Amino acid sequence: MAAQPKTLPADQPSYLEGGGILGWLTTIDHKRVAVMYLVSALFFMALGGFEAMAIRVQLWRPDNHALSAATYNAFFTMHGTTMIFLVVMPLLLGFFGNFLIPLQIGARDVAFPRLNAASFWLALVAGILLHLGWIRGGLPDAGWFGYANLTERYFTPGLAIDWWVIGLLVSGASTVLTGLNFLTTIIAMRAPGMTYMRMPMFMWSLMVTSILILIAFPALTIGLIFLLFDRFFGTHFYVASAGATPILWQHLFWLFGHPEVYIMALPAFGIISEVIPTFSRKPLFGYPMMAYSICLIAFLSYGVWGHHMFATGMGPVADSAFAITSMLIAIPTGVKIFSWIATVWGGSLRMTTAFYFALGMLIEFTVGGLSGIMHASAPIDLQQTDSYFVVAHFHYVLFGGVMFTIMSAFYYWWPKITGRMLDERLGKWHFWLTVVGFNLTFFPMHFLGMWGMPRRTYTYGADMGWMRLNQLETIGAFILGIAFLFFYFNLFKSVASREQAPADPWDGRSLEWSTPSPPPAYNFATIPQIRGRDAWWILKYGHAGSRGVAAYMSGQAPSQPQPSQPASVEDIHMPAPSIFPLVLSLGVGMMGLGLIIDWYRIILIGAAVAVLSIVGMGFEYADFGEESHDPEHAPSSGGVDVRKIGMWSFIGSECVFFASLISTFIVYKSRSVSGPGPQILNIPLTSFSTFILLMSSLLMVLALAATQRGDKRWERIWLGGVIAFGLIFLGGQVYEFTSFYHEGMGLTTNLFSQSFFVLVGFHGAHVAIGVLWLSVLLAAAMTGKLGQSRALSVELAGLYWHFVDVVWIIIFTLVYLMQAVPGA
Amino acid sequence: MIGRGSNRYSIATIVMQIAIALAITGCSATDHPMTTLSPKSDLAQWIQSLYIDVTVWDAIILAIVVCAFILAVFVFSSRVGEAAPASTASSDLGLEIAWTLGPTLVLVMISVPTVRTIFRSQPAVAPAGALEIKVAAHQWWWEFDYPDGAKTGNELHIPANRPIRLLLASADIIHSFWVPQLGGKRDVVPGQINELTFVATVPGMYPGQCAEFCGLSHANMRFRVFVDSPDDFAKWDRAQLAGPAAIPATDLLALNGANVFANSPCTTCHMIQGISKGYIGPDLTHFGSRTTLAAGVLKNTPENVAKWIVNPQGTKPGANMPALLLPGPKMNALVAYLEGLK
């Protein structure tokens, strides 16, 4: 071992110490939030694993009755939903991402710590909502991609799908907030000297993943909102008899769903790129290509969703286009595999459990990637899609690729996170049982698929010849289950032990290994200065890698850089704990619960609680803003305030939100089977309110200018003007909607009316939120709290306001003006 | 197809192709009646050829990766403590270009036949002389309507060596039509008519199954396709167009059963030409001529018919058919009548 075990100095309590239960409930420390994600994900992983075992028991023999059809359908639905939304993403992003982003880029916390805590609590609320069907209404049972129109209330009555819709909406909100937070953190809070090309590859992958989250999840949100309107308010977004098409759901879902695959895979690629160099004692091979290939994969992943829909009859042109773009993804992925092998090549390997899992991932993931090439070829996919072949494929990618990586990450970072080592001997058992169990479970599925066994079938006939392999798979699944028992036991044993892990047990390369294990709440006493890639390695051994290693081999102890000696810990100001993230999430949970069990009082209480806790967070933030050392207000490495970057990220995400709504409107506006169409629109009236809204943007500019020059009087006047104009616009909209109702066009009248009301209504809601926001600012201005130093608050509201206005210009053009043009 | 496609490859790949082709056709269709590896139509054959091409390329790539992996881990590296890393190189332009261009070339080799097969397998208009059959998917059974008016449920008969064009429509939600030996899946989507065009080449019985999750009894939405010789098909078609088989005057049991049927709730949903007009469930006019019932789940035997009528939910959870509890003699009569509907 390179570094000697160190004991913690008494003056550096670790982040795990102190605070009691309340300390955890109110924590906004990224490391504690990460640990809470861990606990919840470990629980859900056991639950999802149990569901998988039950599925395998039912498939043991033909015409088996271990599970009923209904239970089986619920179990495979919840197995997929749980593993994706409540296990893999929370582990990769919530646990490892949260814990390591600030530690690897040399920061004290993420950009928005309260938002981060809110993300966790929302994720937990989502997990609970998804499982409340155990108590009432039954578990969701339409598959993890819940294809419409099976999910319409007519075909699936009851509450099961309602829990699923609301649970996923909350989960999506949580994930988008996490993406926004991570992206801002990585862009803005890197330590001095850490350029993009010096970041650990895990940070690259998380940065790109965050962008993917921001632009992919809104498509799912829109799909779910349409489904929610169909189920609760009687619209027909996916009902063929109303002129709509259930295929719309598939487009929206896979527009999210395929990037989602890379939202899970890219962080895994990043982790592998950390583990392999460490245990090969070599720098990562082809760093620039590795970074670019992550970007390329993310870019391509947004143009391949159609390969999930080859069987739906998109036509040969679309099939060919999606086939080719899907194949292209293999190129950057191949670059990654070869670069990882080249990193190992010539290395001085330390065969730890973490490294075993990383090497195992290389092979298992390659198998999954190669069967993926088969699916990209559309005609082959028509034989393989929805068969067990595809089940084999995505388990090789998601278990062989991602879960192996997660296991590797556990063995690698556990000492840093808990201050305790995991047992290597148990770890090797865990590894080999996993390899045997995994391949025994999933490799035969390739053959079952080729022999025609469809997925999602609770039973099969004895004459199909599928029994033998199914039995082999069930045996494999139980071996895999035992492997997980070893894993859980290893975690338990490690936490129960008293042996202190060294700060740098693997002779690591990145900054987190420069902190004690576990790190103190503030991570770094002094923010380190970064001189190159593999920042900690350079601090230890100097720049020239080979010379450093020669020094290491000759038994020379690494120089002991001391970046974490605080000048005085009292100088470090960390944001205060807050109860509001938890309360906010409870409020959101009450809203969802109330909607489902049809109890409107609970919705109102929940909404009030949520709004009040947002306001409460705002006040905490504002009070804290006076502190000069506030990490939240530190200008970023690029000199731009983190809040501005966060707002721009949010706006980017909103673009996809509105783009999905607008595209749906364009597709549906002329497909109504009856009732009024676009000619009902009142263009003169809307032109007037459009003019008013545009003028409000002008006033917004003036308000910001007044604030920036400290002109309190005009600041109030212009802000008041923006609010007044916003209210006039909303009034016009209320008048317009009311007159439509009187003319016989309600929400559910036809496809035109429902896509119009949902699109324009959501825009109106954005305007209303903007008016509320500006009113709070105006109240602050009236009480003299909105001085020159707070100009940024006005600027942020302005950014939002201008964005909402720009969206309106697009809506006005596409929805209203295009109707006035003959022939459009 | 295999012969023409492989001209491009070296002798080594041809040998590998043959080996793989032997290995997979070794998985016989008798042991695995839903195998995708035993093509019995032009469409299935095209897919099979493409599949073999891609499998060969995949095998080559996997071999390269595994060899490189073994060399890297077990040969060209040392263990920590033994020696310093032999190389600390962190990039090599030549290598990186090679492993970008190599896979790109492979993908070109795969994508050309892929696109060709996509266009070939989805003709815009029906081939000349094609038999167009309307397929309606229901939760959870299949209805087949022939242009000459013949109608059947869950057992599709088609002539060999004549182009078949299936027009797929859904009565409720999304299903997927899949007969592995005759070709790939085609979804059945409400609000649109999807097409599946192929020429079956080998007479025989090929099982199929719904391949898109469609609710509680998705697993029980099976069916059979009978590829008949042209003569057999013509004979079958004539029989289907005729009304229900006449009951021999001596068969008192069946005559009694006809009476039971006519006065039962069965008539609400099931059609028997000239007797009942229901259309919610499958047409029973020629029920006795089918080999299975309950959408391919049960063999068509008197015991199974009785079992099905008494408790449809036991076989197919969620099925719309209500249980019909008849006293023993009446049930026997009804079953005898239905089985006589050849």
Image: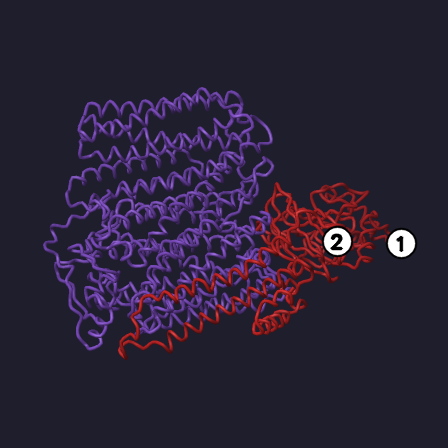
**Residue drawn where x is 20% and y is 68% of the image:** A541
Up-down relation of residue B155 to residue B6 (above or below): above
Front position in the image: A87 or A255: A255
Supply the letter of whichever chain is purple: A
Side (left or right) of A342 relative to A742: left
**Number of residue marks:** 2
**Residue drawn where x is 54% and y is 65% of the image:** A446
Q: Which residue is mark 2?
A: B328
Up-down relation of residue A356 to residue A101 (above or below): below
Side (left or right) of B279 relative to B253: left
Residue type of the residue flagged with mark 1: Thr
| Residue A267 x, y percent position in the rendering | 36, 57
Q: Quadrant of the N terminus of chain A?
A: bottom left
Crowd tier of the residue under label 1, counting other residues whose Cα lies within 10 Å: few below 14, some 14–19, many 20 or above: few
Q: Residue furthest front?
A: B94
Up-down relation of residue A468 to residue A672 (above or below): below
| Residue A116 x, y percent position in the rendering | 29, 47
Q: Secondary structure at mark 1?
A: loop
Side (left or right) of A737 relative to B284: left
Q: Nearer the viewer, mark 1 or mark 2?
A: 1
Q: Secondary structure at mark 2?
A: helix
Of the numbered discs 1 and 2, the one sitting upstream in the chain is: 1
Q: Which residue is mark 1?
A: B250
Q: Are marks 1 and 2 on the same chain?
A: yes
Front position in the image: A157 or A438: A438
Residue type of the residue flagged with mark 2: Gly
Crowd tier of the residue under label 2, counting other residues whose Cα lies within 10 Å: few below 14, some 14–19, many 20 or above: few
| Residue A421 x, y percent position in the rendering | 27, 67
